[in-house]
Image (cartoon, rainbow, N blue to C red):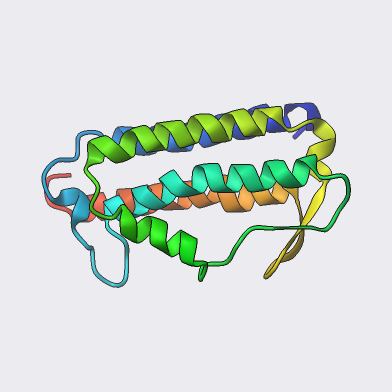
Amino acid sequence: MQEHNAGEERARRLETAVEGLLQRVEGLDGDAAYQEPGGGEWSVMKALAHVAEILPYWSRQARAVADSEGSGQPFGRTHQDPDRITAVEEHAHDPLDEVLPRLRSGLAEAAMALRAIPPEGWVRRGLHSRRGAMTVEQIVDLFLIEHVEEHAGQVQAVMDSLSGY
């Protein structure tokens, strides 16, 4: 991937993932969004609440590292972070018509942030508490794009397991 296109290409990939997710869930009705599939998996709404929260969170983290003067700026969080868990639990029962605008808004913010990262920003390194040194490119790919794609697949699997979807 050429450096000068990194932000645009990643923003488009993220947009594709989120737009696909939105298309899957827009027609979901009744209690289907809240059904727990079992086996410790999240309901559709918990996954949507999480995606709505990670879009702005990780794009801001990546942008902060990209804008830093040097390498080694601490960034991110782990799965045990209370803010991450709280965001999912607080919005696990939100109506679909409330979470969809948050997803769209988060996507717009994240895509704009990625497009604004200059070429030299993509190679800057930050320091994650668990994963160590990572470039902005790695941060965006792992914590944002692949993360959203993973949850989109999770939502599809849950919906496939529900009768009638």
The image position of residue 48, as x and y in percent, is 35, 47
Left/right of residue 110 with respect to residue 40 in the rendered view: right
State the residue lying farthest toward the right.
70
Identified at 69% across, 68% down, the residue is: 129
Point out the image quarter for the N terminus: top right
Left/right of residue 153 with respect to residue 13 in the rendered view: left
Identified at 32% across, 36% down, the residue is: 100
The image position of residue 76, as x and y in percent, is 64, 58
Left/right of residue 57 with respect to residue 53 in the rendered view: right
The image position of residue 159, as x and y in percent, is 24, 50
Would residue 57 be seen by someone viewing this image from the given angle? yes
Would residue 13 be seen by someone viewing this image from the given angle? no
Quarter assignment of residue 22: top left
Point out the image quarter for the C terminus: top left
Identified at 24% across, 35% down, the residue is: 97
Identified at 51% across, 43% down, the residue is: 55
In this picture, is 123 found above or below 120?
Answer: below
